[in-house]
Image (cartoon, grey):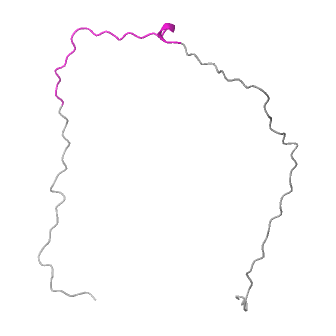
Amino acid sequence: MKPVDNLKPEGEFTGRRKDEAPKGEKRSPIRHEDNLHPEGQFYEKPKQAAPLKGDRADVVKPKDHLRPEGEFAKRPDRNGIPVGEKRSPIRHEDNLRPEGMIIKAK
């Protein structure tokens, strides 16, 4: 049940007027002049040539000093291994049996 009160709105209610505030315009950015001016002539940067042979040492790969000695056992051939028979799966009996009367739905 909703409580009853004696408060009633009296007089006129006015909301915010939407047409009073005009939209503002965005201010244009202020750009100050700089006091930096180039003096004299500017020259292009000279293009560097590819490094010459004397600039960089040759890459020397160290030689391996390990050598296999003697005879090594080889893996046996897979053709000589007989293929076994596949085991039949084991199926256990379940212990779930229907008990009582079974009523068929019509």
Magenta-span inclusion, residue 50: yes
Quadrant where the C terminus sits is bottom right
Question: Which x, y percent locates residue 96?
Answer: 73, 81
**Nearest the camera: 41 or 88?**
88
In the image, residue 105 sits, relative to residue 23, either above or below, namely below
Question: Which x, y percent locates residue 60?
Answer: 57, 16
Magenta highlight: main SS: loop
- The segment highlighted magenta reads 31-57
- The residue at 51%/8% (across/down) is 53
Question: Which x, y percent locates residue 29?
Answer: 19, 35
Question: Which x, y percent locates residue 67?
Answer: 71, 23
- The residue at 14%/71% (across/down) is 13
Residue 75 shown left or right of residue 63 in the figure: right
Q: Quadrant for residue 15, please give it.
A: bottom left
Residue 77 shown left or right of residue 3 in the figure: right
Q: Is residue 50 visible?
A: no
Q: Residue furthest front?
A: 70
Quadrant where the N terminus sits is bottom left
In the image, residue 101 sits, relative to residue 93, either above or below, namely below
**Nearest the camera: 28 or 100?**
100
In the image, residue 17 sits, relative to residue 62, either above or below, namely below
**Nearest the camera: 51 or 16?**
51
Q: Residue furthest bottom?
A: 101
Residue 105 shown left or right of residue 28 in the figure: right
- The residue at 38%/9% (across/down) is 46
**Nearest the camera: 15 or 64?**
64
Magenta-span inclusion, residue 20: no
